[in-house]
Amino acid sequence: DADASNKMDSDMFHWKGLTRQQPRKYQIQAYVQALLQDLIFILPTGMGKTLVACMLISKLKQLNPSYMALFIVDRVPLVFQQAAVIERQTGLRVCRICGETKTRSMINDLNDSKYDVLVITAGALVEMHDKQRIDVSRQFCVLVVDECHHTTQG
């Protein structure tokens, strides 16, 4: 049925209510593009890249409720900063992991689906993956790399 297909398509790109803050037009455009393809979103500081990530995370959690979102940062302070923004904007349950916060209990809670989003330093993610405490290919519906220009090969 064409009407049902069009409704499903419009629901897919629907952005209202995904975040507490009203996005700007360019943020909505970036959100739609991120749904359609992998995207590197470049904007100056303070222009709302994290809000776009929150919209994407919120929508993909709606579409994939049994999976978590993975948000990777390059520095410990960003774990707490970005996690707070994601919680405030989306109302999702956010787990914060860096070298200083990793506990067996937290990892168990993470693997028992007690969180919707994992905000983690790249180093902690590599360590957890190497020790088989996390399975990136099976646990997550979306991957956001914050400050991706700081990533390196290896």
Image: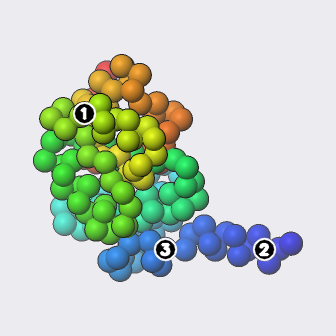
Residue 4, disc: 2
Work out whether mark 3 precedes mark 1 in sequence or the reverse, and give the earlier one: 3
Q: Nearer the viewer, mark 2 or mark 1?
A: 1
Q: Nearer the viewer, residue 14 or 127?
A: 127
Residue found at x 35% / y 46%: 118
Q: Nearer the viewer, residue 19 or 52?
A: 19
Residue 81, disc: none
Work out whether mark 2 precedes mark 3 in sequence or the reverse, and give the earlier one: 2
Q: Which residue is mark 3?
A: 15
Residue found at x 45% / y 63%: 58
- Quarter of the image where the N terminus is located: bottom right
**Quick check: marks 2 and 3 in contact, CB under 8 Å?**
no
Three-letter residue code for mark 3: Trp
Picture quadrant of residue 73: top left
| Image coordinates for residue 32, horizontal then vertical, percent | 50, 65
Say left or right for 2 vs 63: right
Q: Nearer the viewer, mark 3 or mark 1?
A: 1
Say left or right for 49 vs 136: left
Q: What colour-coding does the image apply?
A: rainbow
- How far is mark 2 from mark 1, CA to CA? 46 Å
Estimate how packed mark 1 is, as few (under 14), some (14 to 19) or many (20 or more) residues with alpha carbons within 10 Å: few
Three-letter residue code for mark 2: Ala
| Image coordinates for residue 51, horizontal then vertical, percent | 32, 66
Estimate how packed mark 2 is, as few (under 14), some (14 to 19) or many (20 or more) residues with alpha carbons within 10 Å: few
| Image coordinates for residue 54, horizontal then vertical, percent | 37, 62
Work out whether mark 2 precedes mark 1 in sequence or the reverse, and give the earlier one: 2
In the displayed structure, 150 sits above or below 18; it is: above
- How far is mark 2 from mark 3, CA to CA? 19 Å
Q: Which residue is mark 1?
A: 103
Say left or right for 4 vs 28: right
Residue found at x 40% / y 77%: 25
| Image coordinates for residue 130, horizontal then vertical, percent | 36, 19
